[in-house]
């Protein structure tokens, strides 16, 4: 299975939770050094808890399912404290 398909499969495990809160996530690219760049969509792009969702949910789901991924980044997320 292709790397992108593996990442999509990992995202499918967390997508129902994102959609329940009016959000979603899309793969923008996977770099040659296996960094996944994601775009947070809907409420996920503007929610105050997006940084935690990204780190505790999305990133862990991907890295657990696809060990060759070295990092997960959201291209439209800024950490707000």
Image (tube, helix red, strand yellow):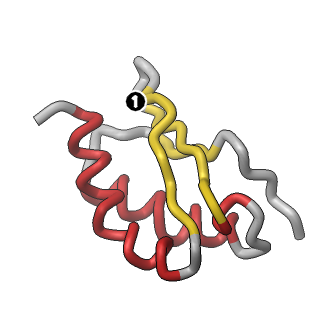
Residue found at x 60% / y 53%: 40
Q: Position of residue 74 (x, y in %)?
A: 62, 46
Residue found at x 74% / y 71%: 47
How many marks the image carries: the answer is 1
Residue found at x 43% / y 23%: 33
Q: Residue furthest left?
A: 1
Q: Position of residue 57 (x, y in %)?
A: 48, 70
Of the pair 10 and 26, the residue shown nearer to us: 26
Residue found at x 71% / y 75%: 49
Q: Residue furthest right?
A: 81
Q: Position of residue 52 (x, y in %)?
A: 65, 71
The image quarter in which residue 81 lies: bottom right
What residue would you read off at disc 1?
34
Q: Is residue 36 left or right of residue 8?
A: right
Number of residues whose C-alpha sits closer than 10 Å to that of mark 1, classed few (under 14), some (14–19) or many (20 or more): some
Q: Is residue 50 left or right of residue 4?
A: right
Looking at the figure, which quarter contains the N terminus?
top left
């Amino acid at each position: 299975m292709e790397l992108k398909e593996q990442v999509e499969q990992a995202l499918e495990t967390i997508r129902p939770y994102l959609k329940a809160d009016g959000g979603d996530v899309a793969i923008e690219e996977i770099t040659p050094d296996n960094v996944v760049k994601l775009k947070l969509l809907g409420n996920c792009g503007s929610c105050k808890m997006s940084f935690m969702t990204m780190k505790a949910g999305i990133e862990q789901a991907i890295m657990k399912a696809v060990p060759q991924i070295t990092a997960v980044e959201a291209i439209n997320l800024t950490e707000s404290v």
